[in-house]
Image (cartoon, grey):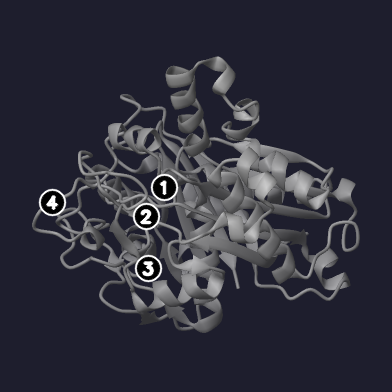
Amino acid sequence: MSVVITGIGAVTPAGTGTDPLWDSAREGVPRVAAIDRFDASEYATSAAGQADFDAGAELPSRFVKRTDRFTHLSVHAVRQALADARVTVGEEASAERTGVMVGNILGGWEFAERELRHLWTDGPRAVSPYQATAWFPAAPQGNICIDQGIKGPARTFVADRASGAYALIGGAEALLRDRADIVIAGGVEAPLSPYGWLCMETSGLGAKSRGSLAPHELYRPFDAGHGGSVFGEGAVFLVMERREHAERRGARILGELAGWGVSTDGYMPYYTVEPTGQILGRAMRTATEHAGISGGDIGAVFAHGSGVPFEDVTEGYALHEAFGPSIARQLPVTAPKSGFGHLLGAAAPADVALALRAMRDGVLPPTVNLERPAPGIDLDLVAGQARPAGDCEHTLVVSRGLGGVNACLLLRR
């Protein structure tokens, strides 16, 4: 029994839909820019990947007023994913046999921040009655279910930057345990509000603005000049099914989630990572074993590539630990998220969408801004421009978060 992907929906800094995301990544077009959503001039990090999405043009005005932007992005991306999969809830699968899994970190701070401002300036009676249901991380999950009439298993995963990967794993496990016939799984993040952005800045993971570099040059995974992530907003959701269910309804199969592995570093302080890469490497190895392959069968790695120096170096160590130096040095490794921003809860689903397209088209998108590998990085990095993928049948997607939360996904063409 296997789990396949039959539809993808995306709203990202590259645009709406998977085609703009793929085209931007393949060509290495930078989508990071100075923040224009609010005045970020006094923040250490003033660049972001911003999605040009007008919720008012796509969703009912009453719904938009009662919910946060991260819900708007999610609902629209899910609608796209279902259309791409040619699925209507209640037809291809019953409402009770359709599930939703969402990865998110911050919740809905645009809405919450506005209402807190009302509280302090005008008093409690000025606060929206929808504050309680608009901001919390599970709001997209609930609103997706309402929008689509879904009544099956639904969960929200909050696991820092690995949240989206955990949502995909949760979806696959629900299918394999026969708790659903179709699961919509993915992630979302909308961190572009003054307070939400401050939370990300104080995490210590963000790339600080530097006068010598333009905003789109700040995010530099594995590069000698790496200094952290440039974050972005977006939502990416996938429609997942058991293979036999997809084939029975004549669905177009985009690829298979063939294996996964998770681990936790258990290392202090929590804002660092285990320094040898052994624990992350174990998740990588588990994912390949789960898929019934070895490291030598992997055609490409879509790295977490946070640009945080100690995370970049230990990710390289982990690949060596998982598969041995001879194989690790031959694996093409890329982190195309540097072109459009680290989408946090949506980062892993975005990487999965790109990896599936890379295997289909036989092209690996480059790591934007990678010019000279940092000391300690002993990998075959895809930099500068796209590279032919050859006969790439398996791709490893790596995701990790604060507290040593690791999740790796093995995709099969």
Lower position in the chain sequence, tag 2 or tag 4? 4
Mark closer to the chain start, 1 or 3: 1
Q: Give the position of the N terminus as an image quadrant.
A: bottom right
Residue under numbered circle 3: 331
Is residue 343 placed above or below 412 in the rendered structure? Answer: above
Disc 4 and disc 1: Cα gap in Å? 33 Å
Q: Whole-Å distance between the Cαs marked 1 and 2?
A: 6 Å
Q: Secondary structure at mark 2?
A: helix
Give the residue type at disc 2.
Leu
Instruction: Estimate the x, y position of residue 15 in percent, counting from the top left.
Output: 48, 67
Separation of disc 3 and disc 2 at Cα?
9 Å
Given residues 341 and 183, the one toward you in this image is 341
Q: Nearer the viewer, residue 354 or 126?
A: 126
Residue at x-position 90% and y-position 57%: 90
Residue tagged 2: 319
Query: Does residue 294 appear anywhere in the picture?
Result: no
Looking at the image, residue 241 sits to the left or right of residue 388; the answer is right
Residue kind at label 4, given as amino acid type? Arg
> Which residue is labeled 1 in the image?
281
- Looking at the rendering, in which quadrant would you find the C terminus? bottom right
What amino acid is found at the position of numbered circle 1 in the picture? Gly
Q: How many dots with numbers?
A: 4
- Above or below, 55 relative to 276: below
Badge 1 marks a residue whose secondary structure is helix
Label 1, residues with CA under 10 Å away: few <14, some 14-19, many ≥20: many
